[in-house]
Amino acid sequence: MLELPKAKINHKSYRSEQFALSSAIGMALMESIGIRKLIDSRCGDSRSDRIVSPGMAVKALIGPTFNLFQRPPLSRVNAIYGLAPTDRLFGNGAVPENLNDDALGRCLDDLSELDLELLFHECSEMAVKKFGFESPIRHGDSTNFSFYGEKKDVPDGEISPEYGKSKTGRDDLLQYALQITTDSNRIIRTMRPYKGNAADSTMDGDTLEFFGEHLSAEERSGMVFVADSKMATEGNVRKVCDLGMGVVTKCPVKFGDGFEQRAFEMSKKAEWHRYDVKDHGGEGTKYSVMLCDLDLEASFGTGRKHRSMWLRAVVFRRPDEIGSKTEGLKDRFRRLEKRYDDLGRKTFDTKKEAIDAFKAIRPGSEAFRAVPCYTEDKVPGALAPGSRRGVNEERIMNSVWKVKVDSSFDAKKASDIVERACTRVLVTNLPHFREGTDGVRRSARAEDVFDLYMEEYVVESSFRFLKSGLAIDHVYLQNPSRERAMMFVLCIEALVTNIADAVFRRMDLRLGNRPLTFYNLARAFPAAVAVFDRDECEIGILINDDDTKYVFKVMDALGINPQLLFGYLC
């Protein structure tokens, strides 16, 4: 048996405090950017009697979310800071008891009185300018958050959650919609909550109005708004043009008097060219697409109210998708033939039963042709009256029906069907490419338009982070104003994480064999803590010696003053 040396027991007490390292870095980055100070400046001095300010409350709320293993409800946030030097993190005199749910809730009330959409925009602008991540591209989309509780009456003009169809299947939950935009660096730039039943086109239109109110004409002139097909209404497209902005969106079927279908028909006679899409690592071709570039008139209204505008249609399809869908149709036809063969071996008592059995097998595609032929056969049935088996045996002849199906595969029609299904149309107002011009807003190839739309996934990645990365898909608040304020808080956390990830990508930092992200950093060092020795007034990191230099390298990359791990700069 292994004998361990006896440990000396020291009865001296130490005044060292600690907090999860990933949380300390996240809050330090928020402080370093200036987000906490900006929030407090917007809230003013009306709550100066409080020990914990609204900006500090936001920092306290998002702190635990940077750690994968500390995501408490509002009522348990103060417990997370039980061993931390809260007076240094959140202001002189602050103790964990000051971070109870009642105090944090009152701070959420303070936030709800502000124009949170504008405040978030200001926080984002400050963050991207600090790190040099300005981008003229805005990707817009919306998602839903579910809330437990009963629907409550709110004052006119206030936003409240509504019951609606949830992707989680929980239609008994109240829902908010959240509209956000991100830029080409995957950084959230705007956010705004809505009722759960808000129309996507309405939210996109409001986002455009926000750009018109808070961005200068010069700023808008270089911007491109990218969104999904729900954005493409006459009003929204005209609004983009009136603001002097560019737009790229997938064309819906009902837009502009059949704009999509007319673009598809015109593309049959137009010139196509191949575009090899490179993977994000720059190593080889990810896939190839065929592109066609057209100018087309979009028409709205009829008679005296007829309106029209000329727009650009970029039509594209993937050859590999056409091949796979064609093979899929052929495979479906082979399965259909087998079902018809099985049907041919069956018998039916009546012709109606045979007809019904044939109709029950639906071809499912216009490329499949099936013609039935019904035949009647006579088969011996029961013994006739007065006859005996084996003596004067005589049987009654019964009718049975069979179905023989003549099926065929129309290759030409199948090709047309697959070609139409694989062809997408993008609508844009970006001008055609001209030599000697810079920026897609002033000169864009068809490839540029395609790339802009395919980068729409950056919004979805932000939504996935908000719901899965933060482990927040349902929220337990009962006050609509606090619920909206909490969505602002969550977006601030996502913004800080977006900035860190963008810095890591720009510097090509890695964690082992993976690209470094804030999520991977927290996952790699789950037990690492930042330690503050109050007696010596020293800040340290409790982590494996080999990883200490790496952590400080990360902090240097983010421009974090180590003092901010446990403290703030006034």
Image (spheres, helix red, strand yellow):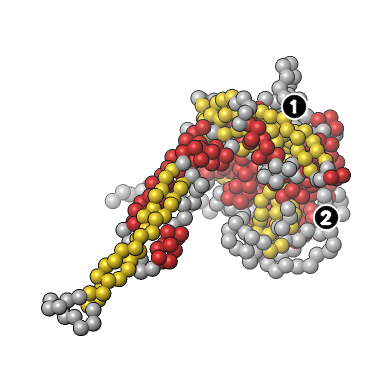
Q: In which quarter of the image is residue 28?
A: top right
- As helix, strand or loop, the secondary structure at mark 1 comes to loop
Looking at the image, residue 340 sits to the left or right of residue 397; the answer is right
Is residue 354 visible from the viewing direction of this image?
A: yes
Q: Which residue corresponds to the image point at 74% horizontal and 48% vertical from the top-left? A: 201
Q: Distance between the residues labelled 1 and 2?
A: 42 Å
Is residue 127 visible from the viewing direction of this image?
A: no
Q: Is residue 449 above or below residue 193?
A: above
**Number of the label disc, if any, that sits on residue 431:** 1
Q: Which residue corresponds to the image point at 85% horizontal and 32% vertical from the top-left? A: 217
Q: Which residue lies furthest to the left in this view?
A: 391
Residue designated by label 2: 113
Q: Assess whether mark 2 and mark 1 are in contact (beta carbons under 8 angstroms).
A: no
Q: Is residue 339 above or below residue 242?
A: below
Q: Residue furthest top?
A: 436
Q: Which residue corresponds to the image point at 79% horizontal and 36% vertical from the top-left? A: 309
In the rendered image, residue 214, in percent from the top left (x then y), is placed at 84, 40
